Amino acid sequence: MRALGVLISGRGSNLQALITASEAPDYPARIALVIANRADAGGLQLAAAAGLPTLVIRHQDHADRASFDAALDAALRSAGVDLVCLAGFMRLLTPGFVAAWRDRLINIHPSLLPSFKGTDGPAQAVAAGVRIAGCTVHMVRAEMDAGPILVQAAVPVRPDDTEATLAARILTAEHIALPRAVALVASGRITIAGEQVHYHDAEAAAAASVFLA
Ligand code: GAR
């Protein structure tokens, strides 16, 4: 059983997907701590409602990124966390933090990486006119929105989509992809070798690709 730390900055719908998944008796991870970098992050209420420990670590209270990340690191370790999930966490982490949690640090991004990195994946997809969009769950590397891809989920882009309608469709896919990727890692059914992901069985490999109509 892995002890999960979840880092959030806002609404927390992906956190809620993890909470719901982890309440199943056979789910291979439990949420040990939820940390928000903003006191007004809606996800804090979701965590509290689920009876989970929460912490607010405000980036403004730290002189630089290194000291903010050191505070995150200390809180995660003292909670016994051994797998960290960035679920809508809108801060860039330092290379030192990323190295310390290498292959134990998972991010969800609302695009089919390596396309559309950055903060506005759905808007970039609409602007580019792509006909398929989606989300990516990946291991974090020092470079933003890069790292071994664990799970991707694809959704169609409709001709009348706006950023908001496409983001909502992608979010539905995120809520499937994130708990699934965490389960694959936490159960040891996939391992990371360098920049490659090894799926240990056909079922795990099949779970890595999600297609929603
Ligand atoms: C999600 O769409 C997530 O993919 C995105 O922020 C949203 C958070 O929603 N993350 C990024 O864009 C990271 N670059 P949530 O708070 O409801 O989970």
Image (cartoon, rainbow, N blue to C red):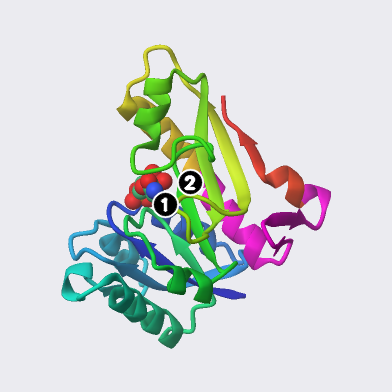
Q: Residue 122, relative to residue 118: is it above or below? A: above
Question: Residue 136: x percent and y percent?
Answer: 53, 44
Q: Are marks 2 and 1 in contact (CB under 8 Å)?
A: yes
| The magenta segment | 175-203
User: Disc number at residue 175?
Assistant: 2
User: Disc number at residue 14?
Assistant: 1
Q: Residue 1, relative to residue 20: is it above or below? A: below
Secondary structure of residue under mark 1:
helix
Q: Judge from the rendering whether residue 59 lies leftward or rightward of residue 167; answer left or right.
A: left
Q: Judge from the rendering whether residue 30 lies leftward or rightward of residue 91; answer left or right.
A: right
Question: Residue 128: x percent and y percent?
Answer: 42, 21
Is residue 155 inside the magenta stretch?
no
Q: Judge from the rendering whether residue 76 lies leftward or rightward of residue 183; answer left or right.
A: left
Q: Residue 162, relative to residue 37: is it above or below? A: above
> Is the residue marked by circle 1 packed among few (<14), some (14-19), or many (20+) residues within 10 Å?
many
Q: Amino acid at mark 2?
A: His
Label 1, ligand 1: CB separation under 8 Å = yes
Q: Amino acid at mark 1?
A: Asn
Q: Quadrant of the N terminus?
A: bottom right
